[in-house]
Amino acid sequence: MHSFKQMDLLPYMYGEVSTKQSNAIRIALETDWELREQYQELLDAQKGLEKISLSPRKKTIDFILDYANSSVKAAYSTEG
């Protein structure tokens, strides 16, 4: 009998488990309805993450650019 948890499924999803463990999880997924349901939830969440597009706020970008600009100016003013 297996004792796999949801946390064991993430490395399995990404192919980060040994062949032996992968086979054991695959068999467990075929026989354990609850584990298979948890696995499907993780797969659905993974698909949802692929659709997310993240970008920094304009204010953050402006802050970084202002900081870089002031750093360059400061560097050139101390060289002279």
Image (tube, rainbow, N blue to C red):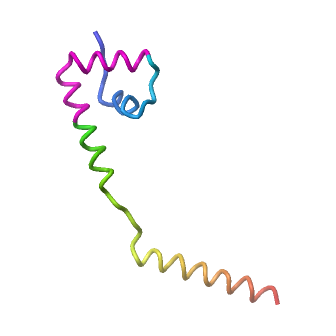
Quadrant of the frame with the C terminus = bottom right
Residue 65 sits in quarter: bottom right
- Name above or below for residue 18 compared with residue 41: above
Q: Is residue 61 left or right of residue 44?
A: right
Q: Position of residue 76 (x, y in %)?
A: 75, 86
How many marks can you see?
0
Residue 15 sits in quarter: top left
The one nearer the camera, 49 or 66, is 49
Residue 28 magenta:
yes
Residue 25 sits in quarter: top left
Furthest residue in direction top, as rendered = 1
The one nearer the camera, 72 or 39, is 39
Q: Position of residue 8 (x, y in %)?
A: 36, 27
Residue 62 magenta:
no
Q: Position of residue 17 (x, y in %)?
A: 44, 25
What residue do we see at 41% from left, 18% from top?
21
Magenta region: which residues?
A: 20-40
